Amino acid sequence: MAKKLKVNTLYSIGAALRPTHPTEPKLFGVASSTKLVNLIKKQKIELLNGKGQITGFNGLVLGIAKEKNLESICILMEIDNPNIIQPKAAQTILVKLLELLEIKPMHMKDLEEQEKKKKFMEQQMNYMDGLTRKDRQPGIA
């Protein structure tokens, strides 16, 4: 399909599960050519360079792009839990992708609102954990 549409470069974005919780999640990138690697570096995206692997749809896109002689870039944001929405990670990736493509920034208020809701839910869960004693019996508030 990309060849039919005369696409030169395929972009994929996604999450990278991190085993630990660093203070600041990292943004990683991979690219299929030196020119695109330099573009990634210019945008201050850390190269994956053997620090993990790309699986699923993102890996498939990169593999097919290579087979079809298309250039490709994949941008991955570290997350700590794939079972919880990650609006901040999505926003960080989108901002960087827009910069790479030299597209004017877009309105991301919805993602910012989702991040606020996520943080509130995390605070509530932490509060509830604090009310439960080590023997898992409810505490007294």
Image (tube, rainbow, N blue to C red):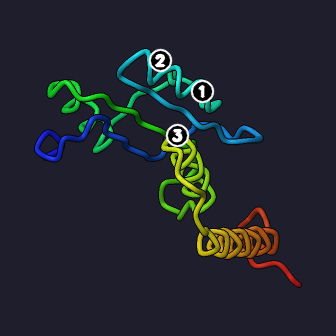
Per the image, the residue denoted by label 1 is 46
Task: Judge the density around disc 3: few (<14), some (14-19), many (≥20) Cα neighbours within 10 Å.
Answer: some
Which three-letter amino acid code belongs to the residue tagged 3? Leu
Q: Position of residue 139 (x, y in %)?
A: 82, 78
Q: Quadrant of residue 140?
A: bottom right
Q: Secondary structure at mark 1?
A: strand
Q: Position of residue 70 (x, y in %)?
A: 23, 29
Foreground tag (3 vs 1): 3
Q: Secondary structure at mark 2?
A: loop
Find residue 26 and name its label. Answer: none
Looking at the image, residue 126 lies above or below residue 49: below
Per the image, the residue denoted by label 3 is 100
Q: Is residue 8 left or right of residue 1?
A: right
**Which mark is first along the chain, 3 or 2?**
2
Q: Is residue 83 left or right of residue 8?
A: right
Given residues 5 and 46, the one toward you in this image is 5
Q: Is residue 133 left or right of residue 11?
A: right
Which three-letter amino acid code belongs to the residue tagged 1? Glu
Q: Secondary structure at mark 3?
A: helix
**Which mark is first along the chain, 1 or 3?**
1
Task: Judge the density around disc 1: few (<14), some (14-19), many (≥20) Cα neighbours within 10 Å.
Answer: some
Q: Is residue 132 left or right of residue 89?
A: right
Looking at the image, residue 62 lies above or below residue 135: above
Looking at the image, residue 32 lies above or below residue 58: above
Per the image, the residue denoted by label 2 is 50
